[in-house]
Amino acid sequence: MTTTPPLGGPDTIPIAPGKIPALGHALAFRKDPINFLTSLSAIGELVKVYLGPVQTYAVTSPRVVYQLLVTEAAHFENGRIFDKMRGFFGNGLITSNGAFHRRQRRLIQPAFSQKNITTYTEVMRREIGELVASWQEGTVVDIQAATDDLSLRIGVATLFKTELGTSAKETVKECLPVVLRGLLVRTLLPDVVFKLPIPGIQRLNDAERRLRAAIGEIIRTYRADGADHEDILSALLAARDDETGEGMSDAEVLDEVVSLVLAATETNSSVLASFFYRLAEHPEIADRVSAEIDGVLGGRQVQYEDLTKFKHTLNALSEVLRLDMPVDMFMRRATEEVVIGETRLPAGSEFIFSIPALHRNPDVYPDPLQFDPDRWIRRPARDLPRGSYIPFGTGGRICVGNAFAWAELTVVATTVLAKWRLTVAPGAKPKRVHQASTHFTSLPMALEAR
Ligand code: HEM
């Protein structure tokens, strides 16, 4: 006769090593977040970790992450880091929970329909076209700074495509980089710090206030104008709930635009910079990708219909999204008692999971640290165990900008490589920093016309 083994409780879960966990874990995390988070899978599927004084459970296996994000997702909300963001983000998609989040997803999803992405692709092509046309043979460009600026321009131009609110748009472009740089500080430091007269803190508060005020002004201008400008903001203003027929208030739209613009910019620019860096490290792959682009485009500009035709480029981008997924860690909090893995845990338990760590799992990815785009030919993502490859998350909170991101990555990658070969500038030693997203401090690359 078989008996079901009893479920464990919090006491059965191993704790990550460290003499004084509250200090040791935080230091190990700060020193090398991916290494620390990746090392936890050797200890167990669920591991107790102290991030400062706060005890969390690190979920390390694809199987249990899938429970958290999909099968048991109804019993979780976003958790601590997101609570801290709410002060500035408001209640947009990134921070909202429960029924309100589900309603907002339904209202926002149509802004990313295939038809709309086709229109946004034209904006992306124009922005990268202008950048590439300004480059000069034989010069060195900081590709991280260039992709940061490009993704910001694309984000703003797809949200607000018209000439309406031009000066407010300039304020958004000016303030957003300051807000993005301050995001980690905002989530780590206690709220009281943001009331102190420290110049850096005041600059951040000021940028956040001006950014929200500028977006609010653009929303009012669009409402008064009433036309469909074929951009994200027009789609948000036109969205109506199928069940109630209601749309969003201006305050709700403002929170959603803040969430979108913050989520859309640094993630894309980090992935793009990593893509050009990885190809520079692997010239034979770069040559193959460039030859494929020549074959598909034959000198013309990329169109929406082309985006799925670049097999090698897409495999290289998939591999960058595996190895260089730019956000180290995500969180959830149980809203009621849950069974996660084989353990019963109380309401209020906080969980962390690391997508880059899942993407380095040697059981799933042979030679996991090797940049090898052909692994996606040998074993496509659909054949991998659930939860093993989730650069855009999975379940009800999967990235709402997933198709937008793929369009931007592909348009930018193919437009650049159709004309230029990029190599790391002689003597440069690019370093990555782990902030709100992981990115290069600078990435000087030499431009050679193809
Ligand atoms: C390569 C670029 C990107 C990556 C790797 C990425 C990754 C992710 C991931 C992993 C999540 C899920 C977070 C979780 O489960 O807690 C997420 C959510 C989200 N992303 Fe992205 N993202 C990217 C680009 C974008 C873009 C371009 C937009 C907007 C146009 C965007 C908007 C959002 C929003 C609003 C959410 C929250 C969704 C929700 O909770 O319902 N992201 N993203």
Image (cartoon, rainbow, N blue to C red):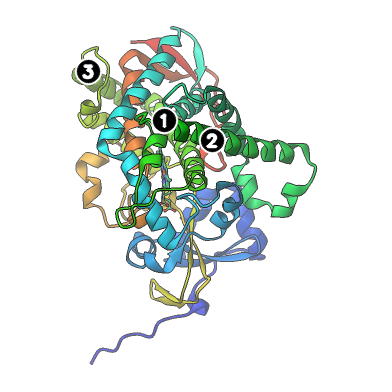
The reply, left or right, for residue 272 in relation to residue 443 is left
Residue at label 3? 297
**Residue drawn at the location 54% of the way across and 35% of the way down:** 215
The reply, left or right, for residue 387 in relation to residue 222 is left
| Label 2 or label 1, whichever comes before in sequence order | 2
| Label 2 or label 3, whichever comes before in sequence order | 2
The picture quadrant where one finds residue 303 is top left
Provide residue 185's location: percent of width, then percent of height. Answer: 65, 46
Choose between 7 and 199: the one closer to the eye.
199
User: Which residue type carries mark 2?
Assistant: Ile
Residue at label 2? 215
| Label 3 or label 1, whichever comes before in sequence order | 1
**Residue drawn at the location 68% of the way across and 51% of the way down:** 189
Q: Residues within 10 Å of mark 2 (few under 14, many from 20)?
A: many
The reply, left or right, for residue 37 in relation to residue 199 is left
**Residue drawn at the location 48% of the way across and 49% of the way down:** 92
Which residue in the rendered view is the most extreme toward the top?
137
Residue at label 1? 272
Evaluate if marks 3 and 1 touch, with contact meaning CB atoms under 8 Å apart: no
334 over 30 or under it: above or below: below
Q: Secondary structure at mark 3?
A: helix
Q: Secondary structure at mark 2?
A: helix
Which residue in the rendered view is the most extreme toward the right?
197
